[in-house]
Amino acid sequence: MDNLIAQDADLIDVLSGVTEADREVLIRLSNPDDETAQRIRRGLIYTWEAGQIANHREQAAAEERAKIVAWLKDIDPYALACGVRHACANAIEAREHLK
């Protein structure tokens, strides 16, 4: 029975965007016993909570992408055409777009 539920959970994960990393965050935050941790990993319990972590992660990534896009739109297009792409990549790594 648990195998069928785990298979269903895998299908839900694909649609909801829940990743293994999201479940691991939940496990670290809740500090469950080993059996509970395994059930969380298999998607048998705490699926709503794992989904909330996934939603938060996806929202944060979307906000970061929006900041990068806005920052890139402010860059002089002639500078980009002249081969400054590496400088842009370095600036993004330095989180200049967040300042």
Image (tube, rainbow, N blue to C red):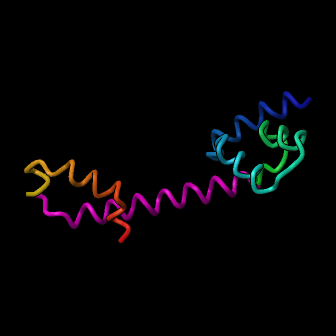
Q: How many marks?
A: 0
Residue extending farthest bottom:
99
Q: In percent of the image, x 28 and y 58: which residue is there?
A: 91
Q: x%, y% of residue 13?
A: 68, 41
Name the residue nearer the viewer: 68 or 6.
68
User: Is 53 contained in the magenta span?
Assistant: yes
Quarter of image, res 14: top right
Highlighted range, magenta:
49-77
Q: Residue at x 71, y 41 (%)?
A: 12
On the picture, is 18 further left or further right than 98? right
Residue 37, x across and y down, in percent? 83, 43
Q: Examine the rendered structure and indicate whether residue 32 appears above or below residue 72.
A: above
Residue 96: x %, y % from top left: 32, 64
Q: Position of residue 66 (x, y in %)?
A: 39, 62
Residue 80 within the segment the image draws in magenta: no
Classify the position of the N terminus by image quarter.
Answer: top right
> Which residue occupies 67% across, 56% down?
53
Q: In this image, 79 relative to 88: left or right? A: left
In this view, 21 is above or below 75: above
Residue at 8% in and 57% down: 78
Majority secondary structure of magenta residues: helix
Q: Identify whether 71 is placed above or below 4.
A: below
The quarter in which the C terminus is drawn is bottom left
